[in-house]
Amino acid sequence: MVENQITDQTALEHYGELRSMVIRSLLFLAVVLVVMIILMHWLIPYLITHGSTTDTSLVLLGPMEVMRIYVFVGLVLAVGLSIPYVGYEIWKFSKPALNDKESKMILTYIPGSAILFILGLLFGYLIVFPIVYSFLIGLGAIHFDMMITAQQYFSFLLMTTLPIGFVFQLPIVMMFLTSLGVFVPQQMRKIRKYAYFGMVVFSVLITPPDFLSDVLLVIPLMLLYEFGIYVSQIVHRKKRNTMEAEHV
């Protein structure tokens, strides 16, 4: 009976901690969203003029379209900027179930993951999106009068940048899997050709059908994979040295 009460109390404490973590994360997201919406007046012109190499004018289909765009783009930016804080909250919630080594390891991955995500967004925004957007606009202008809504423009912008932000997480994922013992660097080298093939397929699918666009995307992805192998070697070496020291 006493054990059941202790178990129920522990479960309620965990539920309360989880609830608090979710509330803090949502409040942080809400604050960042409000800030992004306030800054949207200055961000929107930059996203339009610096992301595209064409002079295509954007149109709105109604007065409420402006608010929908502000909230839509602001929410995506707020989610991206909130990832480090949410990761920290998840780490803090999971910390009691981790040993000191696992806790420190996961905490060190959070800043790296945020930096790589931002670099991926910048790469997609500054390089991939202008190439793909200009190609499709030029292709459509051959046969059609192009009229692009602001909603379509920003949807396409996010569609061509967000996936690359997540793909740039590859080195962090490789390091994490190595630290868990799922993979070792030698295995990653053996499957390199299959990984490269997947990157080529991804590049062909997301970029226009020309060699230059494919190369501009696939080369950074290959470099990320090689960087992931390099940092995984460091993680694997430290893990092996730690295990050998513990057995001495």
Image (spheres, grey):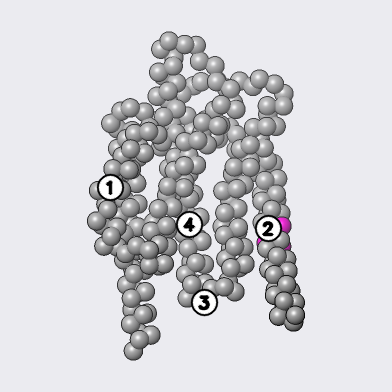
Magenta region: which residues? 20-24
Q: Can residue 13 be seen in this view?
A: no
Disc 4 element: helix
Tell me the quadrant of the picture where the N terminus can be found. bottom right
In the structure shown, which secondary structural element does the residue marked by tag 1 occupy? helix
3 or 59: nearer the viewer: 3
Place of residue 177 in the rendered image (x, y in percent of width and height, measured from the top left): 40, 62
| Magenta highlight on residue 37 | no
The front one of 242 and 1 is 1
Which residue matches tag 3? Answer: 99
Image mark count: 4
Q: Residue 194 carries which label?
A: 1
Q: Give the labeled residue for mark 4.
A: 113
State the CA–CA distance, disc 1 to disc 4: 24 Å
Residue 107 in view (yes/no): yes
**23 drawn magenta:** yes
In this rendering, is residue 247 above or below 174? below
**Amino acid type at image mark 2:** Val
